[in-house]
Amino acid sequence: MRRLGFALLVSVALTGCVQTRQYADTQFAPPSGDYKLLVMRPDVSVGSVTTGGLVEARADWTESARAKLLTALRAQQATRGGNVLILDRRDSLPGVSAETIAELERLHGAVGNSIAVHKYLGDDLPTKRRKGLDWTLGQQAIALGQKSGMDYALFMHAEDSFASTGRVALQVLGIAGCLVGFCAPNIGGAGQFAYASLVDLRTGKVVWFNVLQTGSQVAGIKFGDIRTDKGAAEMVERLLGRMKPGREIRRAQRARS
Amino acid sequence: MSGAEAGHGLDRRTLLAAGGVLAAAGATGVASARVLPAAMVPLVGPGYRPVDADERGMWQQMARVEEEIAGSNLVVQDPALAKYMQGLIAKVGGPAAKDFRIYLVRIPDFNAVMFPTGFAVIFTGLLLRMRNEAQLTGVIAHEAAHFLRKHQIRQWRDTRTKTDLFAILAMGAGVAGGAAGINTGDLTQLGQFGTILSLLRYNRVLEAEADAMGVRLLAEAGYDPRAMAETWEQLIAEEKLSAKYRRKRRRRDISLFGTHPSPESRMADLRVSAAEVTRPGVFYDARRASYLAAIEKLRPTILDDQIKLNDPGASQYIVNTLAQDGWNGLLRFHEGEIYRLRNRVGDDIRAAQGYAAAVRYADAPADAWRWHGIMLSKAGRREEARAALTRYLAMAPNAPDAAFVRQMLVS
């Protein structure tokens, strides 16, 4: 999960804005109506950026951000008609063993890595050209759907970081330096990174994948804070709010209108 | 020491750091003082829980790592062995004796890792190389010391402080240089290099601490503290032989860039430290029998894993080292296997000799009889081959190739 996060993080350019990049199966229609969504142990980590630019994890920030993100996710899915079940621990799904969940998580880690390499890092596969998102978790995912009665599984990872006082002071010095000809106005350091992966448990396919990155190159300027209700809702909306249907579905919609 | 002298010393050090970095890089044997075992007091008590924000963050992240490792299919499923190793870390775990967890993973490498929350991962390759309980406990004591001395969080704090300082100095120098009209880029790069070297040096200091404390914990638990130096002696000799077979020289990391002190200097320090904590007149039991009993079920597998690496130099050294405590059928069989897989001129004969020697021991594995039979058959000694293969089938009637061997015997 962490490694996948890193590969995706490399793929998004460092720019001072909010950006997302989503891919969908050609036949993908965003879930709506009365559907059941299983959220697979969301991986959240929040840290502080040290003066030197390292990210130091903070347990209290991570915990509050995790709780707020889950609340926001529930609320956001409810507007579409979805019933959300959040898997807190590997063994919290009745009738499904912790090993089964662990194996599916690892499988998703490997498949997600392949998506990162071939969709986000630019190493295009000729066999998957013009096929939208063409990856599957196979029988294991279908079996989980049958056992749990869920329609979709969502894998989610979110990171947020905040510039420490020292980092901000360093940034101020860098900007002040512009006056004497040593200009370092964008040392950067803090920002958000998240990805979400939606698996259709009836077919086993990864039907939709999105990567979100927000940040500025100026330490101290932020585009959201997932430790707050507002910031968490914002991230969920940016990540999951605008699910685009797959190409075939869009074409059919256009033909109808 | 007067203030002026102290100031002078500092100046000299600064000068060395700034100007002598490249010169220092050339001198590989930068000697650092040995850490004294007596100075190594535990920094955590029983049931330790972190209080500081940075350490709590680290622990929280580690919970998921431990879950992942504990559930990995690389973990060896042998409850008796797990209990045995848990018992060993309890002996050398000092105040945290009851808090440690050990996971044995099936990787044929010499390695062990302690994580900041008190769980250790030990590779089966390490278990294979240990001759007795004292040696294994020595490694475990070293790992326990990492936790007891809070090494991971100290390492992190050191990294944080040094990168902070570097960032401030680089920015400060840049702005000052800008004001004075000097480009400080080269100096900044030199400073960055110095920061990296300093981080690696701190890592080596912590390793030396773990060695010194490990020796002490080992002696206090009633084991011969010299066992730790023995382990390094074995590792150095193994690496040498492995390199010789490949017609290469043993890899020697430049110690300035190493995360660990060189095996040679560790061995030397460990010997001195061991002498310091050895109590004269005490008989130390290496507890070889209990060690062998604990790994008995696993030993054929981990020997096989090592041989299949096809690193004949290392494998041969390991088999010969283990055989210093007495040859047996299992070791002789694997001696034959090393030659068979190496496959140089004359190795078929050497392999056949290994199998022939193996089957003379009562504990020869079924595969020894199988290969002994095949080698005899190749040599045209049909009746003896038949007898050996029959013995193989009797020992392993459900072997994957049993039907094939039966057919061979019939025709």
Image: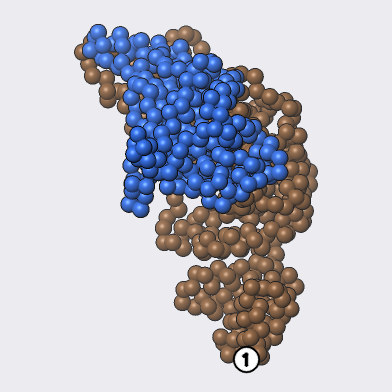
Q: Residue at x 68, y 45 (%)?
A: A97
Label the blue chain with its letter: A
* In the depicted structure, whether residue B217 falls above or below residue A45: below
Counting from the top left corner in percent of width and height, residue A98 is at 67, 43
Query: Position of A114 compared to A147: left or right?
Result: left
User: Which residue is labeled 1 in the image?
Assistant: B411
Image quadrant occupied by the C terminus of chain A: top left
Counting from the top left corner in percent of width and height, residue B118 is at 66, 34
* In the depicted structure, whether residue A222 falls above or below residue B393: above
Q: Residue at x 41, y 33 (%)?
A: A244
Instruction: Identify the colour scheme used.
Output: by chain
Local packing at callout 1 (Cα closer than 10 Å; few below 14, some 14-19, many 20+) is few
Q: Which colour denotes chain B?
A: brown
Q: Chain of mark 1?
A: B
Q: Nearer the viewer, residue B205 or A168?
A: A168
Q: Residue at x 63, y 58 (%)?
A: B302
Q: Nearer the viewer, residue A102 or B133?
A: A102
Counting from the top left corner in percent of width and height, residue A33 is at 54, 32
Q: Nearer the viewer, residue A112 or A209?
A: A209
Query: Position of B87 compared to B354: left or right?
Result: right
Q: Element at badge 1?
A: loop
Query: Position of B395 compared to A180: left or right?
Result: right
Counting from the top left corner in percent of width and height, residue A187 is at 35, 20
Q: Do we see residue A200 in this rendering?
A: yes
Q: Do we see residue A57 in this rendering?
A: no
The answer to which quarter of the image holds residue A150 is top right
Work out which residue is located at the far left of the displayed protein and give it.
B181
Q: Amino acid at mark 1?
A: Ser
